[in-house]
Image (cartoon, rainbow, N blue to C red):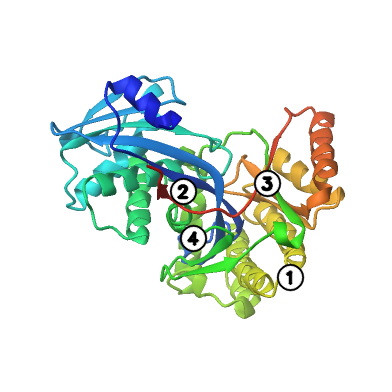
C-alpha cells in the first residue's frame, strides 16, 4: 500500500478502492496560444498528484489534502455551485469539487459521492500546472470508480471546464490535455482548435542533453485578472482583424496585419501569438529531425516575446533566463502563464552543476530568494496506480 492509500485509510477508517495519479507539465514552447486556437508543445513531468478514492452512497463529497491545512472538506454534491466555491483555507478544494460539478453537469452519474485524499509533489504556483494535475487525477479516479466511458481528451475537456466555470480561471485546454494524454519520452504537439494530437519524440538524455526547471519561487495567481485581460485583448484584436482567432492570421501576413491595428497593445499581443505559433511549428520540425540543440535559440526568442510583447514575465524569470544562457544553455525561457513561476533551460547534461551554480549565484547577487532547480524528463500522463 503506497503512502497516499495508507493516509486515506488512516483518515477515513477504511481502505480506498484505488489510487490514481496525474502529472504536472512543462510547456516547451507555445505560451498563451491555446486560448487563441493555436499550437502548443508541452510534456508531462515526473512530479505527480496522487488521489486515493472510494465511492460513497449518500451524495457527500469528502476531500482532504496532505498539502493543505484545511482538514476534511465535506460538500453536498447536489448543492455544488460555481457561485459558491469552497472559501479560505479550503479554496484548494474548488478544483476537485469543480471536477465533480462538471461531471454531474454533463449528465454523468457521480451523485453517490466519494471520499478523496490527495497528495502532490508538483510545486504550486510554479507554472507547472499543479491545478491541472489535481483536476485530472480526481477526474480519472471518479471515471474509473463510476464506470464512466470517458476518453482522455474528454476527461481533459471536463477538467478544463471545472477550472474555467467553477474555479474561475479562463485557461485553455493545454494543461489538462498534457496531464491526461502525454506519453513517456515525447512532447505533445496539440492543435488546440481541432484537438489533434501528435506525440513528438524528445529523448533529451539520449542526445546528451538535460532540461532544467528553475522555479523562481515567485508565486503567480492567474485568477487575479491579468490573465483574463490578455485573453480579452487577443479576442478584441482578432475581431478587429476579421479572423475567428489569432491562429488564423498567417505568419507571412503578420506585418501587414500589425499595420492595420491602431491599438499598440493589440499589436504587441498579436505579434506574440502569431510568432509563438510559428516557433511551435519550427521546434516540432527540429525535434523530428533530432536537432534538439538548434531549438535553444527559439526558446530564448520566445522568452523575449513573452517579456516584451505579452508582458507576463518578471525580474526573477528574466534573471533566470539570462544567467542560464550566459552559463552555456542552448536556450531558456519562462514556462507557464507568467507573473512568476518557472523558467526552462536546455543544457548539455554535464553542464548542469555549472548552470545551476550560475543561476543560484545570480539570484543571490540580486537579493532574491534562492531558486529551486530540478531536472525534467518527458514522462507519461495520468494513470491508475493500484
Residue occupying image coordinates x 38% and y 31%: 5
Is the C-beta separation of discs 1 and 4 under 8 Å? no
- Of marks 1 and 4, the one in the foreground: 1
- Of marks 4 and 2, the one in the foreground: 4
Element type where label 2 sits in the image: helix
**Quarter of the N terminus within the rendering:** top left
User: Disc 4 marks which residue?
Assistant: 34
User: Disc 1 marks which residue?
Assistant: 291
Cα gap from disc 3 to disc 2, whole angstroms: 22 Å
As drawn, the residue found furthest toward the front would be: 1
Cα gap from disc 1 to disc 4, whole angstroms: 25 Å
Cα gap from disc 1 to disc 3, whole angstroms: 21 Å
Place of residue 383 in the rendered image (x, y in percent of width and height, measured from the top left)? 41, 49
Say whether disc 3 or disc 2 marks the residue closer to the N-terminus. 2
Residue occupying image coordinates x 72% and y 27%: 369
User: Disc 3 marks which residue?
Assistant: 343
- Of marks 3 and 2, the one in the foreground: 3
User: Disc 2 marks which residue?
Assistant: 228
Q: Is residue 100 left or right of residue 111?
A: right
Say whether disc 1 or disc 3 marks the residue closer to the N-terminus. 1
Tell me the number on the disc at residue 39: none
Q: Is residue 242 above or below residue 42?
A: below
Q: Is residue 110 above or below residue 52?
A: below
Q: Is residue 190 above or below residue 48?
A: below
Amino acid at each position: 500500500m503506497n503512502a497516499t492509500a495508507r493516509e486515506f485509510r488512516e483518515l477515513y477508517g477504511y481502505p480506498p478502492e484505488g489510487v490514481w495519479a496525474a502529472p504536472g507539465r512543462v510547456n516547451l514552447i507555445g505560451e498563451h496560444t491555446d486560448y487563441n486556437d493555436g499550437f502548443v508543445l508541452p510534456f508531462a513531468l515526473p512530479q505527480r498528484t496522487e488521489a486515493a478514492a472510494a465511492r460513497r452512497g449518500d451524495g457527500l463529497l469528502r476531500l482532504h489534502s496532505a498539502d493543505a491545512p484545511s482538514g476534511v472538506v465535506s460538500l453536498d454534491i447536489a448543492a455544488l455551485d460555481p457561485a459558491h466555491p469552497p472559501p479560505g483555507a479550503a479554496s484548494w478544494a474548488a478544483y476537485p469539487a469543480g471536477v465533480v460539478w462538471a461531471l454531474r453537469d454533463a449528465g454523468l452519474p457521480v451523485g453517490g459521492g466519494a471520499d478523496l485524499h490527495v497528495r502532490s509533489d508538483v510545486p504550486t504556483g510554479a507554472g507547472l500546472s499543479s491545478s491541472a494535475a489535481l483536476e485530472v487525477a480526481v477526474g480519472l479516479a471518479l471515471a474509473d470508480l463510476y464506470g464512466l466511458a470517458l476518453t482522455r481528451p474528454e476527461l481533459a475537456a471536463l477538467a478544463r471546464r471545472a477550472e474555467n466555470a467553477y474555479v474561475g480561471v479562463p485557461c485553455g485546454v493545454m494543461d489538462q490535455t498534457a496531464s491526461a494524454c502525454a506519453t513517456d519520452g515525447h512532447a505533445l504537439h496539440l492543435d488546440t482548435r481541432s484537438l489533434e494530437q501528435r506525440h513528438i519524440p524528445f529523448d533529451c538524455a539520449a542526445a546528451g542533453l538535460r532540461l532544467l526547471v528553475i522555479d523562481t519561487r515567485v508565486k503567480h495567481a492567474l485568477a487575479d485578472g491579468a490573465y483574463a485581460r490578455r485573453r480579452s485583448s487577443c479576442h478584441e484584436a482578432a475581431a478587429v482583424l476579421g479572423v475567428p482567432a489569432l491562429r488564423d492570421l498567417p505568419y507571412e501576413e503578420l506585418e501587414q496585419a500589425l499595420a492595420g491595428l491602431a491599438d499598440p497593445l493589440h499589436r504587441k499581443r498579436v505579434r506574440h501569438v502569431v510568432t509563438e505559433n510559428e516557433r511551435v511549428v519550427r521546434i516540432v520540425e527540429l525535434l523530428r529531425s533530432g536537432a534538439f540543440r538548434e531549438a535553444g535559440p527559439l526558446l530564448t526568442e520566445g522568452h523575449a516575446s513573452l517579456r516584451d510583447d505579452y508582458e507576463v514575465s518578471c525580474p526573477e524569470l528574466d534573471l533566470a533566463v539570462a544567467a542560464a544562457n550566459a552559463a552555456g544553455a542552448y536556450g531558456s525561457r519562462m514556462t507557464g502563464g507568467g507573473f512568476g513561476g518557472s523558467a526552462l533551460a536546455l543544457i548539455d547534461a554535464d553542464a548542469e552543476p555549472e548552470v545551476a551554480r550560475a543561476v543560484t549565484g545570480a539570484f543571490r547577487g540580486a537579493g532574491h530568494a534562492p531558486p529551486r532547480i530540478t531536472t525534467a524528463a518527458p514522462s507519461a500522463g495520468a494513470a491508475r496506480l493500484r
